[in-house]
Image (tube, rainbow, N blue to C red):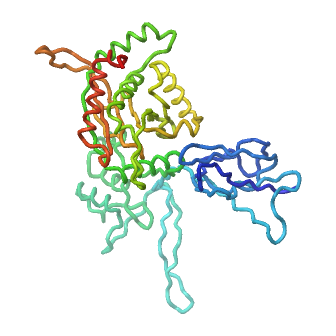
Amino acid sequence: MGIQIIKMPDIGEGIAEVELVAWHVQVGDTVAEDQILADVMTDKATVEIPSPVSGIVLALGGAVGQVMAVGSEVIRIEVNGAGNLKSGPGAVPAPASADPPTATLQTTPAANIAPTVQTAADDGNGKPASVPVAVPATDTQPASPARGTDRPIAAPTVRRRAWELGIDLSQVQASGTAGRITQADLARHATSQYDYDSYQRKQDKGYRPLEAQETIPVIGLRRKIAQKMQEAKRRIPHFTYVEEIDVTELEALRTTLNNQHGQTRGRLTLLPLLIRAMVLAVREHPEVNARYDDDAGVLTRFAALHLGVATQTDGGLMVPVIRHAEALDLWDCAREILRLAEAARSGKASREDLTGSTLTLTSLGALGGIVSTPVINHPEVAIVGTNRIVERPIVIGGTVVVRKMMNLSSSFDHRVVDGLHAAKFIQRLRSLLECPGTLFAG
């Protein structure tokens, strides 16, 4: 029998370290050749680490959430044969298996805490010594508070609540550690002074102090999102421009197209029509379809529109990319949106699917609110956000009519996009969307 050490592979693109986001095996498991051992995440995508051998897992090289260098030890497997572990003085010791951090729910029921009190004992020199003694917790009457001149022990929130209720804390029986008065103790005391039925009704409806805490490690995709958002807001001076769009005619066109071609070509959402408008608008305003390398001081504008579409997944926000949106008709665009969304939500999106965007579109659909301030996807210089469609009364030619209205909330990098150019870009989008026949005239 031998030991095979599997190291973190070189994933390419100059990546020096990755984050370990999931283990698919544990110590003692039997693994087969090509079985997936772990998932790691780069800045671009999630990558699976397969096993090149069959054997039994001896040790894991890291915990979920740990950042590991390329070439570092991932796992040790006991195999039939010699393996690749050096023996003798140069042998590498097995790493301690690390348990992954998990979300924990911590509760501290006051009745189950054993308070510690000080008692006098002889230290051998005839002098009393203070010795801590654990007093067993009981479900009976709570311990009485310390009397005399000692100040009652209570948290600031408890003291504030007692002051609001006009309660003298020295009269409250304490059940917390070392005679600490808790919110529950205060509530119990209050029932002896106030209307018990009223107090009980509040308790039954959930008006009670809660002590639970939940600790959630920020790892994997959520960590990448946090880092990306922080970097974007730190480096990019955002400004947001909001415009109201009348989409009544656009929605009527979409309904007509779905009625005529929905069964054979698939049904259209608003997004393919909006993307078509963006394709035409960036031809006239290329300054928004760009990437800015602020370290090198270089702005690159693109003829092609590689459109990132912000997509919510169970793991967090991802931005798959529709490549060459200018070359797609409405139904091709709709199919590509569906393919990328399914790939992102199932965790099967490739690095190619998630990189190279030149402009981003974000939409929360019916949850879009009336206005938003979207964060630019660094190193891009603009992002377009849609808000929900609502019916509102609008005055047209002196007559009040009901129209379907939607806001576009868009952000721009003020270092390279002037307010005038941003406004002209959004106004061009508005003119295209409010007169949807022009979407197919150019």
Query: If the image is split into quadrants, where does the C terminus sit?
Result: top left
Towards the viewer: 227 or 184: 227
Q: Residue 213: x percent and y percent? A: 45, 51
Q: Residue 31: name its quadrant.
A: top right
Q: Residue 410: x percent and y percent? A: 31, 36
Left or right side of 240 for 25: right
Query: If the image is split into quadrants, where does the N terminus sit?
Result: bottom right
Could you tell me how many numbered marks the image carries? 0
Q: Residue 107: x percent and y percent? A: 48, 52
- 222, above or below 114, in the image: above
Question: Which residue occupies the extreme top position in the image?
Answer: 260
Towards the viewer: 359 or 391: 359
Towards the viewer: 198 or 160: 160
Task: Identify the residue shown where x is 50% and y is 84%.
Answer: 129
- 126, above or below 156, in the image: below
Q: Residue 343: name its quadrant.
A: top right
Task: Identify the residue shown where x is 49% and y is 86%.
Answer: 128
Q: Residue 135: x percent and y percent? A: 52, 66
Left or right side of 6 for 294: left
Task: Identify the residue shown where x is 51% and y is 37%.
Answer: 314
Task: Identify the residue shown where x is 39% and y is 24%.
Answer: 276
Q: Residue 350: name its quadrant.
A: top right
Left or right side of 421 for 236: right
Question: Which residue occupies the extreme left position in the image?
Answer: 398
Towards the viewer: 42 or 100: 42
